[in-house]
Structure formats: C-alpha cells, structure tokens
Amino acid sequence: MVKIITFTLVLLCLPLATQGQDKTPLSAQDIENLLTSGSPQARVAERVKERGVDFEVTTEIRERLEKAGANNILLELVERTSSADTRTPAPETKKLEPKEKPREDDRRKVESEAQGSDEGTKAPPKQLRPSETTKQKVETRRAGDQRILGKIEFLDAKKNYLILIDQEGKLFTFDFTRSMTATEALSSGTRQVPVHQIPRGSSADVGYRMAGDKKVLTKIEFKKTPVVDTGDKQIKGDKQIQGDIGLVDTEKNYLVLVTKEGTLVPFDFARELTATQLTSSGSRKVGMNALGIRSSVSIEYRTAGPKNLITKIEFREPYSQ
C-alpha cells in the first residue's frame, strides 16, 4: 500500500519537474545521449518540441542520429525544428538597421543638393550624364552589333525572313519578328511601317546581331526604289538545275524540285516572281501558280545561307499520254 501511494506521488510531481527543466535548445550531442541512454523516441520528440535545437541538420549530423537509433519521424521533426529555429531571428536583426541608414543618406543628399543650388554649382548636369550614357549604350545595342547596306531581293512575310543583296552582289538572309517595324525615308521625313511591308528592290540600311548561325534584324531603314521591268533580262543566278516539279505552294512561296537522280531540292521564290512557259508556238509569262506537278523546269537560283532563292524559272507542261 505504501509503494502504491509513493508511485502515485511521483507521477503527480512529474509535470512540476518538467516545468522546472532547462529550456535551452538541444544540441546534436544531447539528442545522441538521450537515444543511446535508452530514452523512447516519443520522449526524445517531446524534448525537441519543448526546447528546440541549436544546430542545422547536415548530412553528417543526420548519419550520427541514425546511428544513435533515431527513426524517420524523429529525424523529420528535428529537421523542421532546426529550419524554424534558424529562420526566426533573421528578420529582427537585419531588416531594422538598413531602413534607418538610407534616411540619413537621403537627408545628406538633399542638403548637398540644396547647398549646390545656393552656391551655383553644376551638380544636377553631372548627375544626368550617367543616365544619358546608358541610354546611348541601349540605343547602340538595339542598332545591332553589325551593319550592312544593300537592296531587298526577297521578303517572306509568313516565315519572317528577308534576303538582302549587298553592293558586291552577295546574298544575306535575315530573320525578324512579326511585330518589328522599319523606318521608311520619305521626302517629307520618315515613318514607321511593318517590316513585312517593305517592297522588293528597296535600298536598305540593316542593323543586325548574330544568334548562333542566324542573323537577326535589330534595326532597318529603307527607301523605296522603282522596280524596272527588264523583261527577259532577269538577274542571273549563280547556279542552274533541271528536273520536275514535285510540290508548289504559292501561299508560302516555295517549291520542291525532283532531279533526274531522285533528289529533292527545296526552293523559295519572291511573291511577284513570274515563270516562262515554253510552248510549241513560243513562250509566255505566267504566274507561279501556273506550275503543275511533274512540270519539267529549268531553274536559275542563288544560295543565301541554307535557302535557295529562285531568280529565273522556265517550264514545260508534262506530255499527256
């Protein structure tokens, strides 16, 4: 009977004893000692909740606790408690001091500017110069890393690219965005127009930058020049090829030629390009939509990067059998 009363008194005193325990955060060594001394996982978890921890859980500490017998539930609790304890003090100490210092600096700037205005100093213009130089740098970047002059030979408004011929007769292919605008030079000034509305044959001043192996337009200024109808005196291509038409798309302005060897060769062409149809009685100019599948053609073209640009095309309709 005496033993039962003594045991009951001990149980009643346990809560009072825990209230007087140390509330300092547990170290990794404290948790190890509790586990190795045989304390239950639930009891160790209560200690962690009550006192917290004073360390961050690293890979090394996690391995130590696992060796001491900590299960996954206890390890997760220690990690959560560690992250919470390390995050709380930061906002209180680091965010209060910087807010007051800028105010003192602002006051000093206001006082110095007021003194400069009273003494007739030139402080304000000096403060504007850095912003002006940065604007100039932005403009030069927008103008492109490189520049080239020439004439617009071909422009595809759906695929968003154009081909320029420089003064030496070289072809250059440029990509552009659908929303990009160009500056058109007029007798009364300038105006902005969409790039895809630049007419063929216009003189152009192009600014561009390299994006991998592609030339991307960053700025373009142009002036319309009248296109002279040369009749049969079309611009001769650098290369010539013959074969049969395998595919024609007059909306996207391209066709596929099938050579005698069976090779497929894709070509782009200008929207206003005309073809010469050869007949038994002579020849006539027709639109590219007159080309049919299996039409026998002779093509002159130029190469601009990965694209083949048709400069002249003659064809015969296939013989009916």
Image (tube, helix red, strand yellow):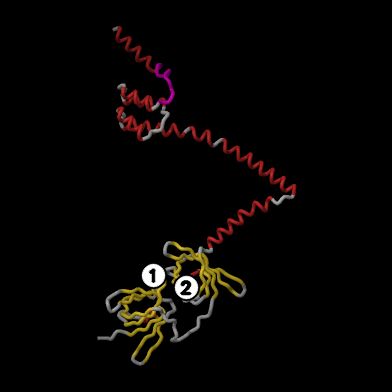
Tell me which numbered mark, 2 or 1, is placed earlier along the sequence: 2
Q: Is residue 134 left or right of residue 208?
A: right
Q: Disc 1 marks which amino acid?
A: Pro
Q: Is residue 253 left or right of residue 204?
A: left
User: Nearest the camera: 19 or 92?
Assistant: 92
Is residue 159 depicted above or below 103 in this figure?
below
Q: Are marks 2 and 1 in contact (CB under 8 Å)?
A: no
Residue 24 on the magenta span: yes
Q: What residue range appears in magenta?
A: 16-26
Farthest residue, direction front: 168
| Residue ID for mark 2 | 164
| Helix, strand or loop at mark 1 | loop
Is residue 178 depicted above or below 33 in this figure?
below
Counting labels gives: 2
**Residue 191, numbered label:** none
Q: Is residue 5 left or right of residue 85?
A: left
| Residue ID for mark 1 | 306
Does residue 46 appear in the picture of this structure? no
Farthest residue, direction left: 321
- Quadrant, the C terminus: bottom left
Q: Disc 2 marks which amino acid?
A: Leu
